[in-house]
Image (tube, grey):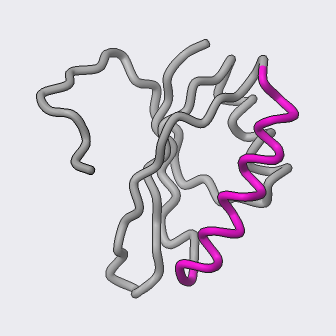
Amino acid sequence: MNLYAILRRDGFADGPTLEAAAARSTEVGNSMPDDVRWIRSYVLGEGSGALGTVCIYEASSEEAIRRHAEAADLPVSEIIPIQDTVVVRPDPA
């Protein structure tokens, strides 16, 4: 499995829409454990007032991420392979 960042720009109208998308993502991801594993997401405040996300996934391929997104009805603006991880400080609580 490789590590990817998935950018979802202006993908969600509001918090409840994002929560529903997260539930769909979890359900679909649980049915694809050998292909996709959701690690974490950061929610972005977009200039439009909508919400975007940067999601970190482990996946067997970019195509597996696209299949997961399509099945969970999630937008995908860009998929970026992650080459390495540098942790300076842990995520704030």
Percent across and percent down for residue 54 are: 43, 50
The answer to whether residue 36 is left or right of residue 53 is right
Q: Is residue 22 magenta?
A: yes
The N terminus - image quarter = top right
Q: Quadrant of residue 29?
A: top right
Q: Main secondary structure of the magenta part?
A: helix
Q: Nearer the viewer, residue 92 or 40?
A: 92
Percent across and percent down for residue 44 are: 37, 65
Q: Residue at x 22, y 34 (%)?
A: 90
The answer to whether residue 29 is left or right of residue 43 is right
On screen, 62 above or below 44? above
Q: Residue furthest bottom?
A: 49
Percent across and percent down for residue 2 are: 55, 16
Segment tinted magenta in the rendering: 13-33
Q: Residue at x 47, y 51 (%)?
A: 7
Q: Residue furthest front?
A: 93
Q: Residue at x 73, y 58 (%)?
A: 23
Q: Quadrant of residue 31?
A: top right
Q: Residue at x 49, y 22 (%)?
A: 3
Q: Is residue 71 magenta?
A: no
Q: Nearer the viewer, residue 21 or 11?
A: 21
On screen, 10 above or below 22? below
Percent across and percent down for residue 53 are: 46, 58
